[in-house]
């Protein structure tokens, strides 16, 4: 039985949508138990009204919670009994196997960093994000790629980047059913000598690894989907991710600016409006199961702050998949082979 | 008389379009002399056939040239008599005031670095790029922003970033007629404490400067045009620039993928095809006068490799503007005030 701990109080739509997502996951997953952490009175009022498997969901009380806009460090110090701190602690003590939260990203990453151990051989944790690309790939014709780190580790050395490559590859294998994910380093040129010292040294080490390492890629290759796993430091990854978030919006506005004059263009835009909506949905990749925090001895899936019940169910399913596929064990074994 | 040295042999369309662009600039500019550096026999065949001001264009012979795909360091070492090396040397010796080239970017930046002095107070050079944004700004309703560095300096310390801010602001003032360009640091969060140590320290120093410093911006703010001058290290700037280059292409393909099914969408795309062409042109900012290499005691305008005659004329005009407005002197004075 895999025990998945869910922060019931984290997220814009918490606790209602979080509890509902957990209830639905209890019906969808076999061999899983869901532990909802949060205000037991509130959850106790919500849960009985929802269809769920009573044998697979239980509540663990935490009297306080951290708000989406609280400062992570201060909030955790002031609220050691907050739902995210208690949830991370349950897993650290061996009373749960994985964590899912839609709450304050900084606070949840910090709670794990304070209480969880890193996988043997991993030097720094990384937050990964899934994004849509032009090319499809893998066995299931999947138009998504993974980029990491997107903000957990801002300054990196070469061995951090090598760890990110191993973790990203293991996650893509598991979640995208892609047996040999193409792993690339993001740099300012494709030559092995391009980039800061950490990127150049990581390139040399990845060439000798068993990963499907395709070398350096450039900014242009990110949306194209040339790689399944894009490896970079948390600073650059964060800038890239936020640029990807704005891409649809920007192009639609630029297009309007470019052709506000002509009637045929206005008609064309009107005919395309449902396509643009569909494009927005496609590029809103937050709905696709959440961002994994990789590198710790337990899986943590960070669902988007705006997650509804469906998004939470998906995030819980991803956490379950990570446990069934022994994600952390795979990362540990690959790091041992590399060393 | 401002003497502008032009590498006649650099660029995909060299020497024909380069020489033609220089010929046109000789008619358009007053108080300027253009020195074409390259194979005197070849240029001597081209120039007489073109309308130009014979008193404002002259040819300086260089027997060899560096190809677009040559390795910069090797090529410069093997060809000290190449057009770009000779052109940079002319300026270094005081026989020219500014340099324009559409040739191999790495080789031309390296030629300047080897032969030119940095402006007093500037620690590292930066290559800047102009890109289109959603918002318009400044006195001339200009929809463009500047980002630097985009590849000259990959590893930076705080004082490098402060220098980039001063140089970018001086250039935007001059070229965009924007009296108080809004300068921002690119980071992974808007708080002053966000980012690598160099960014945090540069933030603190810029707050005390006379620049119109608006603080940190994030990836999403780049295409929006929240800042007129975006300051970052050459690694991140290069990744960002190459992502911007691919944005139209990517969204058009994503849109097609999202709606290949519906007839109304296909008709809509057809109606929009000329708008998409116009958008492509708008986002092909290379036509807008070239990328300045900032930080050296002389202006260098790097025109895009695919530059035609019109693009070269524009790049020569920008170099002229930099001389008339004493760009390098302004940078030097601002750095002295800051120190």
Image (tube, coloured by chain):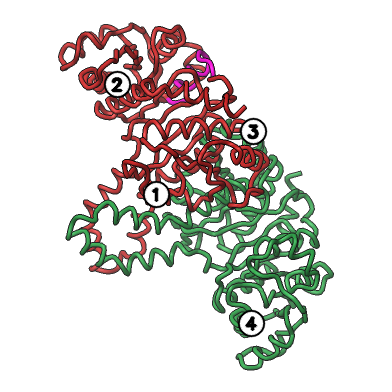
Chain colours: A green, B red
- Cα separation, mark 4 vs mark 2, equals 66 Å
Q: Give the chain of mark 4.
A: A
- Queried whether the magenta region covers residue B305, the answer comes back as no
Residue identified by numbered label 1:
B247
Whether discs 2 and 1 lie on one chain: the answer is: yes
Residue identified by numbered label 2:
B14
Marks 3 and 1: in contact by CB < 8 Å? Answer: no
Residue located at (69% from left, 75% from top): A6
Residue identified by numbered label 4:
A19
Residue identified by numbered label 3:
B157
Quadrant assignment, res B269: bottom left
Above or below residue A114? Residue B225 is above
Q: Is residue B101 left or right of residue B47?
A: right
Quadrant assignment, res A2: bottom right
Which span is picked out in magenta?
A: B105-118
Q: Is residue A236 left or right of residue B285?
A: right
Whether discs 1 and 3 lie on one chain: the answer is: yes
Element at label 3: loop
- Which quadrant of the figure contains the C terminus of chain B? top right
Q: Residue furthest bottom?
A: A49
How would you rate the neighbour count of disc 3 (Cα within 10 Å): few for under 14, some for 14-19, many for 20 or more?
some
């Amino acid at each position: 039985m895999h025990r998945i701990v869910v922060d019931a109080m984290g997220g814009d739509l918490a606790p209602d949508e979080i509890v509902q997502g957990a209830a639905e996951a209890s019906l969808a997953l076999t061999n899983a138990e869901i532990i909802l952490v949060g205000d037991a009175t509130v959850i106790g009022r919500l849960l009985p009204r929802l269809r769920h498997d009573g044998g697979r969901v239980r509540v663990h009380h935490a009297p306080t919670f951290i708000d989406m806009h609280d400062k992570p460090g201060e909030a955790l110090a002031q609220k050691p009994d907050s739902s995210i701190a208690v949830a991370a602690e349950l897993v650290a003590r061996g009373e749960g196997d994985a964590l899912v939260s839609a709450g304050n990203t900084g606070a949840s990453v910090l709670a794990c960093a304070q209480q969880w151990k890193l996988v043997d051989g991993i030097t720094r944790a990384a937050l990964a994000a899934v994004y849509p690309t032009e090319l499809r790939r893998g066995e299931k014709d999947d138009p998504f790629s993974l980029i990491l780190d997107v903000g957990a580790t801002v300054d990196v050395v070469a061995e951090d980047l090598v760890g990110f490559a191993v973790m990203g590859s293991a996650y893509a294998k598991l979640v995208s059913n892609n047996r040999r994910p193409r792993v690339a380093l993001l740099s300012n040129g494709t030559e092995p000598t391009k980039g800061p010292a950490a990127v150049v040294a990581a390139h040399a080490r990845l060439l000798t690894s068993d990963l499907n390492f395709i070398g350096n890629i450039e900014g242009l290759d990110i949306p194209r989907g040339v790689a399944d796993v894009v490896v970079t430091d948390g600073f650059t990854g964060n800038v890239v991710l936020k640029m990807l978030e704005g891409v649809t919006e920007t192009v639609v506005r630029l297009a309007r600016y470019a052709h506000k004059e002509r009637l045929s263009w206005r008609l064309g835009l009107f005919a395309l409006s449902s396509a643009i909506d569909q494009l927005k949905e496609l590029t809103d990749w937050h709905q696709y199961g959440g961002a994994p925090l990789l590198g710790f001895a337990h899986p943590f899936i960070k669902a988007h702050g705006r997650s509804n019940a469906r998004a939470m169910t998906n995030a819980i399913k991803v956490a379950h998949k990570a446990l069934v596929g022994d994600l952390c064990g795979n990362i540990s074994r690959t790091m041992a082979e590399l060393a």
